[in-house]
């Protein structure tokens, strides 16, 4: 007979390794290439001493003259907090009891819940990769006070089923769940009525994943967004190597892409090994090759992703990328600093599945304490089709 003890054992032994592997390697092909490490983790912080520029202790001289004076490396201390990443499943006591007499039914129940958690986690962590750490999903205005429909500026970061926190003029209003959407009309439906403030278009209503405002990992948005003035505790304006390369073009050409790659090598001594882009940018890339009757090569990446390539560099399209934008990245410049790998939260009795106080349900929570750090922000680049 299946019991809570056997359920705990199954989550710990049967599911944890599989789930951790998928969250580490199948969220996004770029993240799969990034090294996971704990070498710069100090308590709850990440402290990384980053060299920039070159060593100044070199020079030429005479046969008997003085040697070049030592001029050591330049260093900047990056300091940021580990972010708390969670994923929770919930099983009703009734469902557990109904499946307790048959191992197969119980396994199916757990598997269905884990697949739902994985799907939501992959969506959320891929979204965070392109975010700026604030957790902002988007902004908009309600169609009416007391109604349930909300018009967004974009639904890139939205999926029905999300539980979100609603802020009006940057002040928390309430939480709601998204029950439906119309992607073309850019509308979503909440499970609770919109307030009068949300229908006031003179006020800014913004959505964040529940409890996540200003608590997400430092994604690409923090590197490329000019409105983000500091990163890892350092002012961008004080250190030019913190500002990435940015170019625009009106009509994509092969020369545009080569110019970005050349800039990365000439200005930052870096060679990007990964290109990500929006769907419309990928279409421009495909049309470029099609119109010029060029061969479009592909390669298979870790995790089974099939990517187009440019000069041997894989190119992947992603819904969370800004429209008309290519990102040129070097995965060797990034580290996922972590306190440890994914683990279940356990109580003092070693239980993973715990009853939710006051409810006939049991919950289990996966956790990882991590932060994404780029040691050479200025070596990354983007190309925008304007």
Image (cartoon, rainbow, N blue to C red):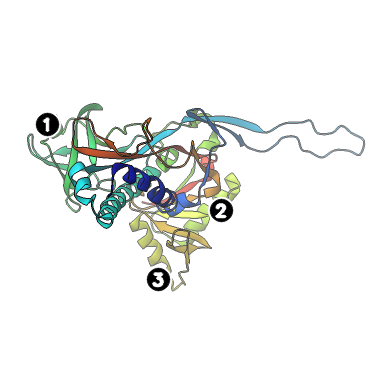
Which badge, 1 or 3, comes first in the chain's sequence? 1
- The image shows residue 96 at horizontal and vertical percentages of 22, 46
Q: Which mark is residue 267?
A: none
Side of 247 where 185 appears, left or right: left
- The image shows residue 77 at horizontal and vertical percentages of 56, 29
Q: Residues within 10 Å of mark 1 (few under 14, many from 20)?
A: some
Q: Which residue lies under the disc numbered 2?
A: 262
- Foreground pick, 251 / 304: 304
In the rendered view, tell whether residue 300 sits above or below residue 368: below
Which badge, 2 or 1, comes first in the chain's sequence? 1
Residue at left 38%, top 60%? Answer: 282
Q: Residues within 10 Å of mark 2 (few under 14, many from 20)?
A: some
Outermost residue toward the bottom in this view: 293
Q: CA distance from mark 2 to mark 3?
A: 24 Å
Q: Are marks 2 and 1 in contact (CB under 8 Å)?
A: no
Q: Which mark is residue 195?
A: 1
Local SS, label 2: helix
Q: Which residue lies under the disc numbered 3?
A: 290
Q: Is residue 137 visible?
A: no
Q: Can you tell which of label 1 and label 3 is closer to the viewer?
A: 1
Local SS, label 1: loop
- Foreground pick, 68 / 368: 368
């Amino acid at each position: 007979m299946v019991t809570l003890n056997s359920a705990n054992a199954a989550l710990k032994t049967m599911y944890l390794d599989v789930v951790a592997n998928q969250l580490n390697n199948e969220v996004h092909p770029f993240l799969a290439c990034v090294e996971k490490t704990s070498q710069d983790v100090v308590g709850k912080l990440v402290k990384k001493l980053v060299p920039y520029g070159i060593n100044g202790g070199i020079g030429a001289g005479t046969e008997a003259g003085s040697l070049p004076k030592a001029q050591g490396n330049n260093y900047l201390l990056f300091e940021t907090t580990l972010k708390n990443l969670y994923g929770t499943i919930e099983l009703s006591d009734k469902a557990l009891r109904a499946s307790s007499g048959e191992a197969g039914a119980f396994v199916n129940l757990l598997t269905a819940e884990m697949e739902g958690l994985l799907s939501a986690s992959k969506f959320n962590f891929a979204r965070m990769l392109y975010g700026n750490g604030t957790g902002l999903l988007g902004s908009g205005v309600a169609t009416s006070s007391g109604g349930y429909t909300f018009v967004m500026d974009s639904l890139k970061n939205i999926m029905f089923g999300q539980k979100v926190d609603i802020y009006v003029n940057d002040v928390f209003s309430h939480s709601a769940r998204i029950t439906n959407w119309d992607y073309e009309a850019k509308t979503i439906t909440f499970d609770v009525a919109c307030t009068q403030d949300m229908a006031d278009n003179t006020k800014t209503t913004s959505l964040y994943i529940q409890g996540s405002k200003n608590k997400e990992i430092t994604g690409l948005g923090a590197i490329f967004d000019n409105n983000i003035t500091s990163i890892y505790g350092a002012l961008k304006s004080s250190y030019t190597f913190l500002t990435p390369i940015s170019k625009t073009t009106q009509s994509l050409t092969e020369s545009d892409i080569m110019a970005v790659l050349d800039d990365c090598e000439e200005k930052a001594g870096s060679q990007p090994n990964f290109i990500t882009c929006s769907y419309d940018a990928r279409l421009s890339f495909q049309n470029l090759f099609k119109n010029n009757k060029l061969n479009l090569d592909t390669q298979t990446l870790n995790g089974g992703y099939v990517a187009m390539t440019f000069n041997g560099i894989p190119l992947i399209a992603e819904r969370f990328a800004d429209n008309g934008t290519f990102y040129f990245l070097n995965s060797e410049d990034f580290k996922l600093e972590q306190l440890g790998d994914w683990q279940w939260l356990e109580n003092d009795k070693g239980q993973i599945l715990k009853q939710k106080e006051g409810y006939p349900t049991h919950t289990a929570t996966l956790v990882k304490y991590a932060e994404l750090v780029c040691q050479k922000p200025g070596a990354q680049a983007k190309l925008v089709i304007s």
